[in-house]
Each structure stands twice: as structure tokens, then as C-alpha cells.
Image (cartoon, rainbow, N blue to C red):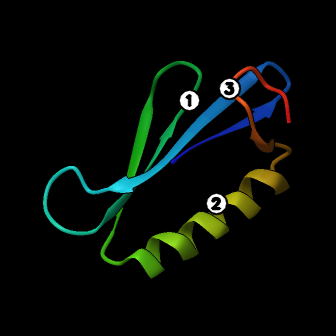
Amino acid sequence: MFYFFQRGSDLLRCEVRPAAEGDGYEISIVQRDGSERIEHHATSEQVHQRWLELHDQFQSEGWKGPVTQDGRG
């Protein structure tokens, strides 16, 4: 599942997905410049809890979203 967050003209792309290798799940966070950070989580409960934490963090940092890829909420 993809999620987008916008702050001014900046856009973050987040994806929650099954791990590419092995068991578990990943959260991929891609910045506008293309840099990517991937977090690995063992269970769906852990990845869901982390996603909620990230969502709160993004909002506290002034990010709006999730929004559509073109920046509409």
C-alpha cells in the first residue's frame, strides 16, 4: 500500500509491503530526491504500530496526508 505526504512542494512516498527477502514486512520511505529508507519488521502487528508512529511523526513535522500523488487530500 502506498501513502503520500506533502509539506509545501515536498512529497514523501511511503509503502508498507511484505519483505523483499525473508519473512516479515517493510516500510519504505522515499524522499523527493529519490533517497530511500527501509525499515524491517517481523510481524504485521509491529509494522502496523510503526506505521501509526510514523504517521503521527509526519503530522507533527508539518506533513499533510496521506494525500494523492498529485498532492490532493
Q: Quadrant of the C terminus?
A: top right
Query: Are discs 3 and 1 less than 8 Å apart at CB?
Result: no
17, above or below 23, in the image: above
Residue at 53 percent across and 72 percent down: it is 48
Looking at the image, residue 37 sits to the left or right of residue 18; the answer is right
Image marks 2 and 3: residues in contact by CB distance under 8 Å: no
How many residues crowd mark 1 within 10 Å: few (<14), some (14–19), many (20+)? some
Q: Residue 46 has which mark?
A: none
Q: State the CA–CA distance, disc 2 to disc 3.
A: 18 Å
Relative to 24, does residue 62 appear above or below in the rendering? above
- Amino acid at the residue labelled 3: Gln
- Quarter where residue 44 is shown: bottom left
Residue type beneath disc 1 = Gln
Please tell me which residue lies in front, 42 or 57: 42
Sequence-earlier tag: 2 or 1? 1
Task: Identify the residue under disc 2.
Answer: 54
Q: CA distance from mark 2 to mark 1?
A: 14 Å
Front in this rendered view, residue 43 or 39: 43
Q: Position of residue 16 (x, y in %)?
A: 46, 53
Q: Secondary structure at mark 3?
A: loop
Location of mark 1 (residue): 31
The label number, if any, that marks residue 69 in the structure image = 3
